[in-house]
Amino acid sequence: MWKREESPRPPQPVVPPTAPTPPVVHQSTTPRVEPVQPVQQEKTIVNIGKSVIIKGELSGSEDLTIEGQVEGKIELRQNVLTIGPNAKIKAQVLARAVVVEGSVQGNIAASEKIEIRDKGSVEGDLSSPRVAIADGAHFRGSIDMQQAKGSEKHEVKPAVAAPTPAPAQPTAVPAPVSVAR
């Protein structure tokens, strides 16, 4: 019979027993695409209670209801600010929408609307494209209802009387003028 020659094999090292290795998984060259689920933002409303007093700047990116006292500046550019019936605010206010049920001393600017409810009180200037003042509400100040240009960059400014434009003059076509040189 024929006998096949085998080359000598090197000795195999002795390996102590270990945890079994996980099986090798080969990935497909085509990536698996999961359907995209719309991200739902939770609409959270933060409350500042009756006993809370804040002095300084207050800003955030959530809707806010204030029942306590705030002195300084309130800035919620993309959110709704509700001034509760017990709130006492002495601040400049900047928000997307403002609902006043309590007392505010200071200017209010909103990119969408300002609403002063029947027991609300505002002493200051209002600047918003939409303003609603309920019967029984107290308001002392001026109102600017112009659309904000570039609605993101709306700042509260003191009311200044605009210069009165000159009355319109009839326009005449000027006669040609010759210049001697």
Image (cartoon, rainbow, N blue to C red):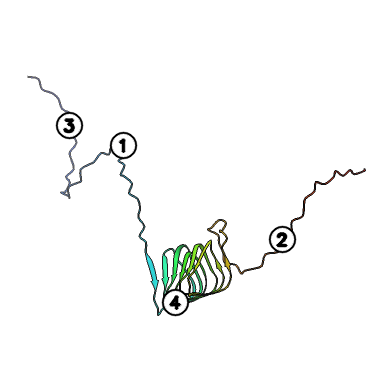
Distance, label 2 to label 4, CA atoms, is 42 Å
The earlier-in-sequence mark between 2 and 3 is: 3
Which quadrant of the rendered structure holds the N terminus? top left
Label 1: few (<14), some (14–19) or many (≥20) C-alpha neighbours in 10 Å: few
Query: What is the secondary structure assignment of the residue under circle 1?
Result: loop
Give the mark, 4 or 3, whose residue is nearer the N terminus.
3
Crowd band around label 4 with a 10 angstrom C-alpha radius: few (<14), some (14–19), many (20+): many
Q: Are marks 2 and 4 in contact (CB under 8 Å)?
A: no
Q: Nearer the viewer, mark 2 or mark 3?
A: 2
Of 56 and 11, nearer the camera is: 56
Q: Nearer the viewer, mark 1 or mark 4?
A: 4
Residue 101 x %, y %: 44, 73
**Mark 2 — residue?**
165
Report the residue marked by disc 3.
Answer: 8
| Residue at mark 4 | 87
In the picture of the structure, the residue carrying the numbered disc 1 is: 30
* Badge nearest the viewer, 4 or 3: 4
